[in-house]
Image: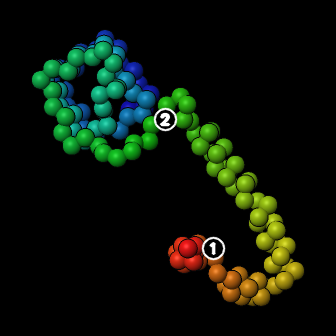
């Protein structure tokens, strides 16, 4: 179920199984003797609804991807594009250095200098 809104509906003796819903809501609905098995229909999706003699079994866990109005695919791709664009200057400088210095020499020099993160556990000993 994608982007479905049920309003003023009655669900009696229904069985919902393996439902993954994004942007689906139940407004002013009534559920009587209904079983929800392996669904992601959580409490916030039932707006002013009544759930009577119903059972929720094996609800989906974890972070479910929810395509709400403020989290659309355009923004996801746009943020990914900005992240790729942010590393572009470093890639250009790295390519120019590699062309000028040479691949093996540059790799050897990078491996010969210790990374600051690998030295940081040693530094607190000399601080006193």
Q: List x then y, in percent, for residue 42.
A: 30, 32
Marks 2 and 1, Cα distance to the nearest angstrom?
41 Å
Residue density around tag 2, few if under 14, some if 14–19, many if 20 or more, within 10 Å: some
Q: 35 above or below 118? A: above
Q: Nearer the viewer, residue 17 or 46?
A: 46
Q: Which mark is residue 67?
A: 2
* Closer to the camera in the image, 96 or 119: 119
Decide which of tag 2 and tag 1 comes sooner along the chain: 2
Q: Which quadrant: the N terminus? A: top left
Which label is found at residue 49? Answer: none
Q: x%, y% of residue 33?
A: 13, 24
Can you see residue 108? yes
Picture residue at 80% right of the left edge, 72% below the top: 95
Rendering colour mode:
rainbow
Where does residue 60 sit, x and y in percent of width and height?
A: 29, 43
Whether residue 118 appears in this view of the structure is: no
32, above or below 106, in the image:
above
The quarter of the rendered structure image containing the C terminus is: bottom right
Circle 1 residue: 116
* CB-based contact (under 8 Å), mark 2 and mark 1: no
Q: Secondary structure at mark 1?
A: helix
> In the displayed structure, would residue 60 be above or below residue 32?
below
């Amino acid at each position: 179920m994608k982007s479905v809104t049920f309003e003023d509906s009655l669900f009696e003796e229904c069985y919902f199984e393996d439902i993954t819903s994004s942007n689906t809501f139940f407004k002013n609905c009534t559920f009587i003797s209904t079983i929800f098995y392996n669904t992601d229909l959580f409490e916030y999706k039932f707006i002013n609804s009544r759930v009577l003699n119903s059972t929720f079994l094996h609800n989906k866990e974890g972070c479910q991807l929810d395509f709400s109005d403020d989290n659309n695919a355009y923004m996801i791709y746009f943020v990914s594009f900005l992240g790729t664009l942010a590393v572009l200057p470093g890639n250009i400088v790295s390519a120019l250095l590699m062309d000028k210095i040479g691949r093996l020499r540059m790799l050897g020099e990078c491996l010969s200098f210790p990374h600051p993160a690998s030295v940081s556990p040693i530094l607190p000993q000399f601080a006193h």
